[in-house]
Amino acid sequence: MAEDEKPKKRQRMSIVCVNCKARKIKCDRGRPSCGNCVKVNVGHLCHYEEPHWANRVPAPSSPSSSSATASAPVSTKVDTHESLPTDTTSINDELQRLKEQVATLENQIATGSSPSTYSSASPSLFSRKQSVGSTHAPDDSYNETVDFYDYNTLTFKRSCMEEEKPLSSSSHAKRDPYLLLMQGYSNLCNTLFKSKFGDLKRKPKNKKSRLDASLTEFLLLLGESKTPEINTVVENFIQARSEKHIFPNVGNSNDLDLLKTQIESLLPNKSVLKLYFERFKEVLYPFFPFVDLKFFEDRIFNEIVNGGNQQDSKITLIIEDKFDIIHLATFLIILRLTYISLPDSDQGELLRTPISPEFITKALYCISRFNTMRKTKLPLIQVLLYLKIYFNYSPEDGDGSKLGQSYILFGDIVSSSFVAGINRDPSNSSQLSYDGDFSNLIRRVWHGILEIDRIYSPISGNLCLIQEDSYKVLLPQLVAGEDSEIEIEIANEYKKSRRLLKLFCDLSKLINNVAKPPNVLEILKITAAMKSYLNINYNLRSMKPLKGEPKDKQKTHNFQNSKTLLYNLQANSLILSVYQNLSLIYETNDHFDVNKWKNFQFKALELAMELYNIIYKLLKHGYQDFVDRDHYFYLNRYIENTVQRVLNTLFSMLIRLYHSEDLIARGVAPPEKSSVIEELTSLTFKIAAGLNTLMQSTLGSKYYQAFKSSFRYKFLLRSLNKDGYKCIRNTASFINERFPSDPGKKYLMLRKLELRSNPKNVLNELDNSNIFITLSNPELSDLLNILKSCEILNDPFYSMDDLIWTTSFKYQENDFIHQLENLASHNSTTAIQKPFNIRQPSTNQTPAITALAEASQSLPPLPPAPSVLPQMSQASPISHILNYQQVIPSDPVLGINGAQLQSNMINLDQFLNDNFFDFDSLWNSEYGLQID
């Protein structure tokens, strides 16, 4: 050996298990699990390092060079994100997954198709006869690129501007020309109402008591603004509002003593606080395990919060450490989060001691004492993470209808995590590796952030913020003392969900690639892999019943089953968005293809009905044998978001069916299909009305976004039920025939009505592009059969013909069931009276006009207006309005000034001809046509 040549280091292989090596204790080297791991009940996590030479062994050559699998690259790298399965259950799951892959590869070899990353169990979209979950590879005809952003994605509001991205729940309404016209119609109705009566919504000085403009308008148009039930619900939402600003203007609250005094006045006695924390540990912690329970509980109850357990005992706060104020903020958020998770049927001590939204406001004051924009630490990341979770689940406003309003906050959390370095495993840092508990806490926090990113970013339409190559963190490991079944299940769930969460991220990345339009075939392979993974790992039929199980088992089953339901809603919602977008893409001139449109339209409807039935069963407590009511809070916001996607699918189809009826009535289309089209229209309407009413009667009384959207859908349903496609034709005719000649103002009006071009041109295009009218009778029968699979049709109440005309929120006490359900359950034949004190409208009356009369339905009609008014032209596209003269009382909840409303509701044509409708003042008005 040369003198300057250094001796080679011997590459020794560690012969002790990884856990013993990390804990620096003697290992007996037992296989498959060492004695130390068995003693602390973590034998399933015991594993040994692979020999260093294993990574250098070349992959064996395939005996058949022509095999499809032989050409696929074989990775020799060890997956740093997850270890190989060690316990029997994990091995069986892995074997089952590999069997599925082998079967798929054999099928590909037989058919001559090439393997792909997402080629396992891909459903065919070439034949409608195959079900949504079938396992055939997509046809090569889909090997083409399409732009998912080929529509006007931008929305301007008074408070913000945002992009309705393709995977969001609102994108369908922005892309579909029929839904756009319907949105323009509802905006026009609101405009006409305000132009007639002025601004009915005085702005209260207290911002907390304001309602969204669009909600107030729909309540007025529906004539339900003064019903006591709605006023009660609205008052509850107003009282439940909390501070939304992440960095509030703290003012005097910057004084720590004053802030402590304010928080002390909010806190109940110590025994109640402990009850809340026990419920947090029991119900919420398995889903959000981002604090060290032992440390946090000891710090809060033995160091920070002092006071007796008696009812009148006063709480005293002791802040000794700088970060105690952050621990306190985390505790305040946990208290409020625990309170909103309580089922309404719970009449225990906790509901008798409510935790108000003021707790969140005070938590924000605590956070604002730290410079979170420049410096961070794990307690700051933890409190912001729980704040993000609260915004996701809060009923008073939540994260918006698209579940994406805290996306900016989440970006700060991700950035802080990278700054703090928790995107790398703690074992890489000598300051952290010695403390197993703290290292595992960091791992749980990181994987919690990763899970939130993979779930909420795609479902809100956004790109995932964390890239796959930007982190390397081991999965959380069990340590001594953490041997409960739920802790084991939490650790297993991180591993089990990893591939599915990655598929969510991959789909979002592909569709949101604005620089390079995605390939349809690649998208379908991802959605197929998602469906396949659901069927194997999160199958609804595999959920475990709670009955007869011990408490620990019930806790584990609740956790497992809630995750199963969540991922079924999430994955199928994303797939439904893909089908919706592709059906609209293949309906346009650039990619027009009747066969592909049919495939995706039928697939979308099939999947919508599958989701519909899951939602119906959830909201009617059909899964109570698998998920108890304590855990419904985890699913409610996802249910609400999914309802919007399903309703958009139904509305898109419903308007096209009304258009088909219109084409037949005008002689543009042959009359032979009239009866089946009418049957389809009636059935689709009944299903949509049932779902919207179900959402309103369950989620709508607690969740503000569900409350708000239910009235918007209800107004559209009533309008379509009265006039069908005529309301859309009237919208276009009104703008074309009654609009000033100023092209600039006309463009502004079109933009405000969410219309892309001249409505007359849009109508002509739609007359020539409605594919529904070209479907054969067997195809229409297929649609009928898909709709008839909807379980709500067997519900005697939610399938009533006149359901949409019932008054909202007349519920039984302490229940979410509409009082009229009793009528249906007793098979009563009594007709339900429409709750509007108006004259019967003529056949050519539009909902826009009827809504004006309905807005004052509780007042008796007076004689018609004087005969000096000019007569209405029968050829006018806008029908007459009923003549009323009445005094509308003030409404303190909605902010209506009754003194401003005394006027005649006169004939709309005369109303326009007399220049009563001033467009200039409309454009200069404070509200205009913007919809929140």
Image: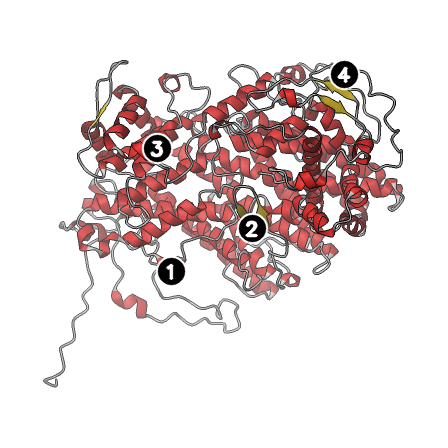
The total of numbered circles placed on residues is 4
Q: Which mark is drawn over residue 469?
A: 1
Secondary structure type for disc 1: helix
Three-letter amino acid code at the position of disc 4 = Pro
**Disc 4: CA contacts within 10 A as few (<14), some (14-19) or many (>=20):** some
Looking at the image, can residue 88 be seen? yes
The residue to which callout 3 is attached is: 333
Which residue lies at the image location 28% right of the left edge and 14% below the top edge?
311
The Cα atoms of the two marked residues, 1 and 3, are separated by 33 Å
Residue 653 place in picture, x, y as percent: 71, 42
User: Which sits earlier in the primary sequence, circle 2 or circle 4?
Assistant: 2
Q: Secondary structure at mark 2?
A: loop
Q: Are marks 1 and 2 in contact (CB under 8 Å)?
A: no
**Is 257 or 410 nearer to us in this picture?**
257
- Dot 3 falls on a residue whose secondary structure is helix
**Three-letter amino acid code of the residue under disc 3:** Ile
Q: CA distance from mark 1 to mark 2?
A: 25 Å
Identity, as a three-letter code, of the amino acid under mark 1: Asp
In the picture shown, does residue 116 fall above or below 326? below
User: Residue 304 at x, y = what percent?
Assistant: 21, 29
First in residue order: circle 4 vs circle 1: 1
- Residue picked out by circle 4: 861
The CA distance from mark 2 to mark 4 is 47 Å
Q: Earlier in the sequence, mark 3 or mark 4?
A: 3
Q: Mark 1 packing: few (<14 Cα in 10 Å), some, or many (20+)?
A: few
> Where on the picture, by quarter, is residue 798?
top right
Callouts 4 and 1 close, C-beta under 8 Å? no
Q: Earlier in the sequence, mark 1 or mark 2?
A: 2
